[in-house]
Image (tube, rainbow, N blue to C red):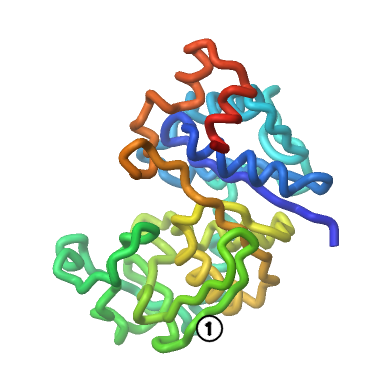
Amino acid sequence: MHYRGRIAPSPTGYLHLGHARTFLIAADRAKPGTLILRNEDLDTARSRPEFVQAMIEDLHWLGIHWQEGPQPSGKDTGPHAPYAQSQRRSPYAAAFQQLRQAGAIYPCTCSRRDLQGAVRAPHAEDDDEPLYPGTCRHRSPLTEAPTAWRFRVPDGETLHFEDALQGPQHFTAGTDFGDFLVMRRDGVPSYQLACVVDDAAMAITEVVRGRDLLRSTARQMLLIRALGLSQPTYAHADLYLDEHGNRLAKRDNARSIRTLRQSGLSPQQVRDLALS
């Protein structure tokens, strides 16, 4: 099968060395197949046009070239446009309705304050999402009131997958992760739902991303099954850690690709730093 991979940054800040590491690995694994750039800009509160332009420029400067998606020219290329998630609401809505009709999701009225006392999943560096206590599990999927929606996980089922970079993985629903959001109260789809729908629509054969998203893969496997989609393979790259052993954040501007470019480093030097 023809390989189709993707890199999918969110334009909520400048890309840093951690992003460079993952995206360089993704680009290398996509050779000689097709690499797609997807703009995951659903976080309307933090996504900014200047960050979209910066990520395209920085990736191109780094030597990463993609065949589909937004280009430095400002235009999309490829058969699956648009490649910005903010412009792809229709397929997310269709998937949501499919899950709702199947009874796979339920409305949730819990506020953040309600969840502050929730029992959390066992501590893990790669996941800090609260283990939802099931407060709203009894609610009918027929409600029409504005509300958030959660996927009902099959408690006790263990999801297995072979990761190309991390080896065999398994996570148990209801223990390692709980019922998770698929739609926010304001109608914005969650990362889990949008990612699954877009990966299927764009015929992605392998998902390459950071190790911090391993548990998200188990969640997404459940969505893929519920929606009757084909499951890609997975490769989760090790994270880039600072001198204290902490993973980088977008607020860490000293290690952003843009800052390193402006300091005079060459693309090869930044690539070497990212993969060191």
Q: Residue at x 21, y 63 (%)?
A: 111
- Counting from the top left corner in percent of width and height, residue 41 is at 49, 42
Residue type marked 1: Ala
217 in relation to 247, above or below: below
The local crowd at label 1, few if under 14, some if 14 to 19, many if 20 or more residues have their Cα within 10 Å, is: few
Give above or below for 189 relative to 221: above
Q: Quadrant of the N terminus?
A: bottom right
Most foreground residue, 235 or 276: 276
- Image quadrant holding the C terminus, namely top right
Q: Which residue is pictured at 67% across the width and 70% down the height?
A: 231
- 53 lies left or right of 29: left
Seen at 83% across and 45% down, the residue is: 32
State which quadrant residue 251 falls in.
top left
Give percent across and percent down for residue 150.
38, 72
Residue at which label 1 appears: 102
- Number of callouts in the render? 1
Image height of 197 relative to 157, above or below: above
Q: What residue sits 60% from the left and 78% below the top? A: 225
* Residue 257 visible in the picture: yes
Which residue is nearer to you in this view: 65 or 191? 65
Residue 42 in picture, x, y percent from top left = 47, 46
Identify which residue, 102 or 168, lies in the foreground. 168
Q: Is residue 234 left or right of residue 218?
A: right
